[in-house]
């Protein structure tokens, strides 16, 4: 009987270990620091177990406490440490009225918005120029970099690793009203593609790699594509302004858009290659 009890206890321990390992791996992949925070939080979570009898109460208090601790660490401890460790700073969340994250919860709470100070300055400059040329226009950033360690990639964007790359959203129009929109039509902007029109070069066909359109294929089920149209005037200006920045080294964009937006003469704008995801839902800027 004792042997059975010990076996059950051992299997419970193993189950807990695997569960925590999965949590740590997932948090590390998505937030860089979340796995470490969970590891530090575990003794407190165990301590809570004895304080709350129904399991759901203990879990609710545990998850709420972890969320609060994670947010406080991300907001107040990560920024100074990131600056000290590899000189990165967060892109503005609410402080700049022209430059904003496309989704605060995803890009900022998960710590995807860290860059070198010169990159931040450059983004703010372009966003201000856009707001002057097109009053009311906000410029939205998407994935940038994690806060720590040069060379550590922000999956699945394996080139976002040194604090010198930022994905930017295009500008869009609402077809029904014809009005300019603030941001892209999907939650994260990724997947809302301005696909090649008839007669334009289609890299999907040329590359023969269906994986490069994975996000587009998934996202199209969650919004009405026909209700939105790429704002070619504002998007062309936005890309042009980034390319005018001396410190910008390269911009990755799908070839059909480079031609459609009249940007063929700008050498800094390049095709990202057949192996990378398509870039007609955002553009990628490298400093
Ligand atoms: Zn990118």
Image (spheres, grey):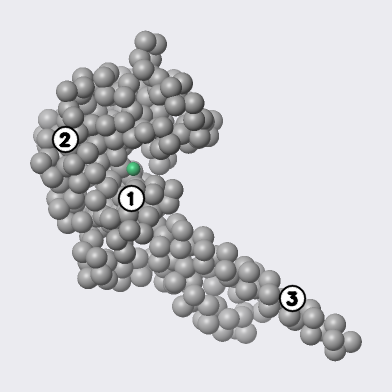
Residue at numbered disc 1: 160
> In the rendered image, is residue 188 in sight?
yes
Residue at numbered disc 2: 243
Q: CA distance from mark 3 to mark 1?
A: 40 Å
Q: Position of residue 218 (x, y in %)?
A: 53, 34
Which comes sooner in the sequence, label 3 or label 2? 3
Above or below, 56 relative to 225: below
Q: Position of residue 3 (x, y in %)?
A: 85, 86
Which comes sooner in the sequence, label 2 or label 1? 1
* C-beta proximity under 8 Å, tags 2 and 1: no
- Quick check: 62 left or right of 93? right
- Nearer the observer, disc 3 or disc 1? 1
- Image quadrant occupied by the N terminus: bottom right
- Quick check: 11 left or right of 147? right
Q: Quadrant of ligand 1?
A: top left
Above or below, 3 relative to 212: below
Residue at numbered disc 3: 11
Given residues 106 and 61, the one toward you in this image is 106
**Residue depicted at x 45% and y 57%:** 30
Q: Position of residue 255 (x, y in %)?
A: 31, 24
Q: CA distance from mark 3 to mark 2?
A: 58 Å
* C-beta proximity under 8 Å, tags 3 and 1: no
Which comes sooner in the sequence, label 3 or label 1? 3
Mark 1 lies within 8 Å of ligand 1 (Cβ measured): yes
Q: Which mark is residue 78?
A: none
Mark 3 lies within 8 Å of ligand 1 (Cβ measured): no
């Amino acid at each position: 009987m004792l042997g059975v009890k010990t076996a059950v206890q051992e299997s419970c321990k193993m189950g807990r270990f695997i569960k925590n390992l999965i949590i740590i791996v997932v948090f590390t992949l998505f937030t860089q620091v979340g796995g470490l925070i969970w590891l530090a939080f575990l003794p407190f979570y165990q301590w809570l177990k004895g304080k709350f009898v129904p399991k759901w109460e203990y879990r609710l208090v545990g998850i709420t406490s972890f969320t609060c601790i994670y947010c406080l660490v991300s907001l107040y401890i990560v920024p100074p440490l990131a600056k000290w460790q590899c000189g990165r700073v967060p892109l503005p969340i609410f402080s700049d009225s022209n430059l904003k994250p496309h989704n605060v919860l995803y890009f900022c709470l998960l710590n995807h918005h860290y860059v070198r100070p010169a990159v931040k300055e450059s983004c703010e400059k372009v966003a201000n120029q856009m707001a002057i040329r097109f009053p009311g226009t906000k410029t939205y950033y998407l994935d940038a970099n994690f806060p720590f360690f040069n060379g550590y990639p922000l999956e699945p964007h394996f080139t976002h690793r040194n604090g010198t790359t930022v994905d930017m959203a295009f500008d869009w129009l609402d077809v029904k009203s014809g009005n300019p929109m603030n941001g892209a039509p999907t939650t994260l902007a990724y997947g809302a593609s301005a696909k090649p029109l008839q007669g334009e070069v289609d890299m999907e066909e040329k590359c023969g790699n269906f994986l490069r359109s994975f996000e587009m294929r998934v996202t199209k089920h969650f919004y009405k594509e026909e209700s939105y149209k790429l704002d070619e005037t504002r998007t062309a200006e936005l890309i042009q302004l980034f390319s005018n920045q001396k410190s910008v080294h390269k911009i990755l964009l799908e070839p059909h858009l480079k031609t459609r937006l009249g940007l063929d003469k700008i050498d800094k704008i390049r095709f990202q290659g057949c192996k990378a995801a398509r870039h007609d839902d955002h553009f990628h800027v490298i400093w």
